Image (tube, rainbow, N blue to C red):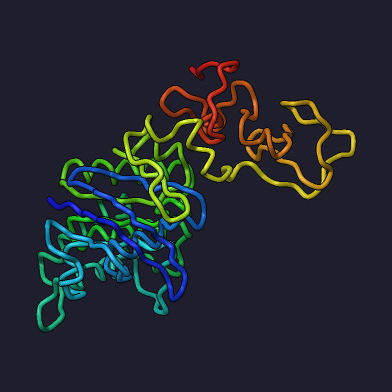
Amino acid sequence: MSSVVARAIRAGYKDREVLRGVDLVARAGELVALVGPNGAGKSTLLRVLGGLLRPASGSVTIDGVDVASLDRRSIARHIAVVPQVFETLFPFTVREIVALGRTSRLGPLGTLGSDDARAVARALDDIGATDLAERRIDRVSGGERQRAVLAMALAQEAGVLLLDEPTAHLDPTHQRATLDRVATLARVRGLAVVAVLHDLNLAAAFASRVVLLADGAVVRDGQVGDVITPELIGRVPSPAHWRSVTRAPADDRCAACERPLDVARYARCDVCKGVRFCMDCARTHLCTDRCTSNGCIAGLCVHAVRAGVVDPRYGIVD
């Protein structure tokens, strides 16, 4: 059981500072969701936590040990990282990809032992990818590849798991199933998990805590209900299903304020189709009064949560 603690982190790239005095704690058994607009510093913070980027100031400790004092092999035994993009030049099988997670634990000869084989099999089972084990990594879908990379991270048997948009290539069913598995593993095995998530529904459903970043600083760190609020969530960009369209019919009006739409720029819900809003109203209104096309989180319409506003006119979706 591990915990990771970051204190007063300032970090960036060359002459560009990205993180400005960030504090973050992820304890054993927690799934901490990092949310915030693009460019807020979420991925940079994961790189600092994983020892991949040295901060200009501040410290990161794993169970009280400064990450800066550890070599890469030692860090890999404590911290597993799932990046946004994973590429390999060789047509390994999924099982072989997952086995790469054992690298830091191999002996001098670099061969897999029985303990390693068991760890690989368990990781595949944990993430629901056993059926993919013998398939080539270049012949699986993007979502299946992502599950393989998650299994590789689990095979490291590290106490800290850092996930950078782990559901980006998954369909909605596998998004929820994967995060459900990760949250369960965190609780059962005492993992400290930090995950960058852009879908606030998933953060609300599975995170133990939510940390909102904006402009390289922590805006709020707390329970889901304390962070995902109408007042704060305006700092998170509009969700993917709001599609900005280049032109609107000249006589069309916003479904909320009923003002004529700007013919050059408006928003349309890509789930419900056809319901149009001006760009101002797109962030503060539901796309339809009781749409449940994507399901419901914590008794709230998903579109209310995604848009950042729970409009009392529409009530609770049952």
> Can residue 131 be seen in the rendering of this structure?
no
Expressed as whole percent of the image width and height from the top left, the position of residue 129 reads 33, 54
For residue 49, which quarter of the picture? bottom left
Q: In this view, does 303 lie to the left or right of 203?
A: right
Give the farthest residue toward the bottom. 109
Expressed as whole percent of the image width and height from the top left, the position of residue 62 reads 16, 59
What residue lies at 38% left-to-right and 65% top-to-bottom? 135
Viewer-proximal residue, 90 or 168? Answer: 168
Could you tell me how many numbered marks the image carries? 0
Expressed as whole percent of the image width and height from the top left, the position of residue 245 reads 75, 47
What residue lies at 28% left-to-right and 42% top-to-bottom? 183
> Can residue 13 be seen in the rendering of this structure?
yes
Expressed as whole percent of the image width and height from the top left, the position of residue 274 reads 74, 34
Q: Is residue 194 left or right of residue 251?
A: left
Q: Is residue 235 above or below residue 260?
A: below
What residue lies at 48% left-to-right and 59% top-to-bottom? 141
For residue 260, which quarter of the picture? top right
What residue lies at 72% left-to-right and 26% top-to-bottom? 256
